[in-house]
Image: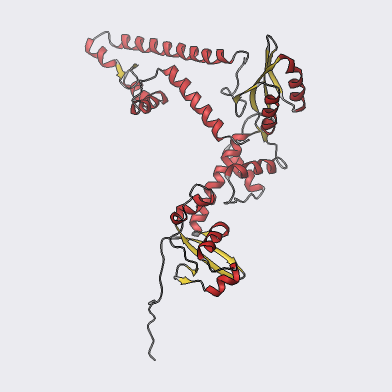
Amino acid sequence: MSRSITQPIGQKRLTNVAVVRLKKCGIRFEIACYKNKVLSWRSGVEKDLDEVLQSQIVYSNVSKGVLAKTKELKTAFDTDDQSKICLEILEKGELQVAGKERESQFSSQFRDIATIVMQKTINPNTQRPYTISMIERLMHDIHFAVDPHNSSKKQALEVIRELQKHFPIKRSPMRLRLVVPIRNFTSLMEKLNTWNAVITSKDESGDQSSVVFEMDPGFFRECDTLVRNLQGRLEILAMSVHMDGDAHVDNFDDFEDISSSTIKESNDSVIKLTERIQKQTISTGNGNPEEKETKQNRCNTCDAVVGDSKQYREHFKSDWHKHNLRRKTRQLPPLTQEECLSDLEMSDSRADLKDYAF
């Protein structure tokens, strides 16, 4: 019995494309898109439709090149204008990806959500954050499922609310400083009491009164509105307060003095380190002047003496050296160690303020 050979003569196979599928009136419709442009279009970054669609043609099956029938288009969309239909499919359709790729995306977003939850929550008993592995285990316990259509920050806030129903966990408080006219100070303190804010310090001297306190981030917008109505000023001192050495400051009466005291402590540590390096150099270089010279290593990038060979190697791994390298590429002068510490702290504070979702 003879067997006929079937050849795909009438097929237009489209490969290496992203397919967006929409099922309407029991009929499947597909469009061929560029993979990295679909999400940009939906988020509003990409505006040019031609950069998103490979062709403004509606298919029944993109992989086989089967076009959708005009009768089916009119039945489902009440029009045969393929440009309008492509827009509707692009907005409402489901992006088709491979199983392993979808699993990788979900796993990555799950980790991102857990990281945000860890950064924004603490254990109310210890006032310290949970570990990332503990957060992930708690999320599995409440059977959390990632929604790829919502942002990680929005889902993280939903996870926090759900975890609070079953486990000892709460939002880590913010540390704020409010400065208002003295006549409005009483109204401010009454409002802080209703928010259960923890007062750290306050100053009622002069025409302006200030108060430093910690409160739940959920009241931030209301607090910002209150300060505007009271003709005051709001300063964010810490986005998330934890029970550790870096998060606590003993005195907030003068915020400028804090920075100066930090720089002074850094200066003292640098002076002590320099003295120790000099002592080591002198003690090891008594015998031979050439050996003494070899023990003194200088970093041209940081314009500083960093000691013996071991300290020289460790210096190249330090944040101080790396920060000066980045400045050198921008043709900026090097910073001292204390200036570098202050610069990095300011950069971290700006990054936290930018990424925080209230």
Horizontal relation, residue 198 to residue 268: left or right: right
When asked about the image quadrant of residue 334, the answer is top left
Specify how the rendered protein is coloured: secondary structure
Horizontal relation, residue 168 to residue 118: left or right: right
The x and y percentages for residue 44 are 53, 48
Horizontal relation, residue 48 to residue 327: left or right: right
- Quadrant (top left, top right, bottom left, bottom right) of the N terminus: bottom left
User: In this orientation, does residue 219 appear?
Assistant: yes
The x and y percentages for residue 353 are 56, 30
Q: Is residue 235 above or below residue 133?
A: above
Residue drawn 26% across the image and 12% down it: 292
When asked about the image quadrant of residue 63, the answer is bottom left
**Residue lying furthest bottom:** 1
Residue drawn 55% across the image and 43% down it: 112
Q: Is residue 24 above or below residue 255?
A: below
- Quadrant (top left, top right, bottom left, bottom right) of the C terminus: top right
Tell which of 86 and 189 is nearer to you.
Answer: 86
Residue drawn 58% across the image and 58% down it: 92
Q: Is residue 38 above or below residue 324?
A: below
When asked about the image quadrant of residue 254, the answer is top right
Q: Is residue 5 above or below residue 297?
A: below
Residue drawn 56% across the image and 12% down it: 257
The x and y percentages for residue 103 are 52, 54
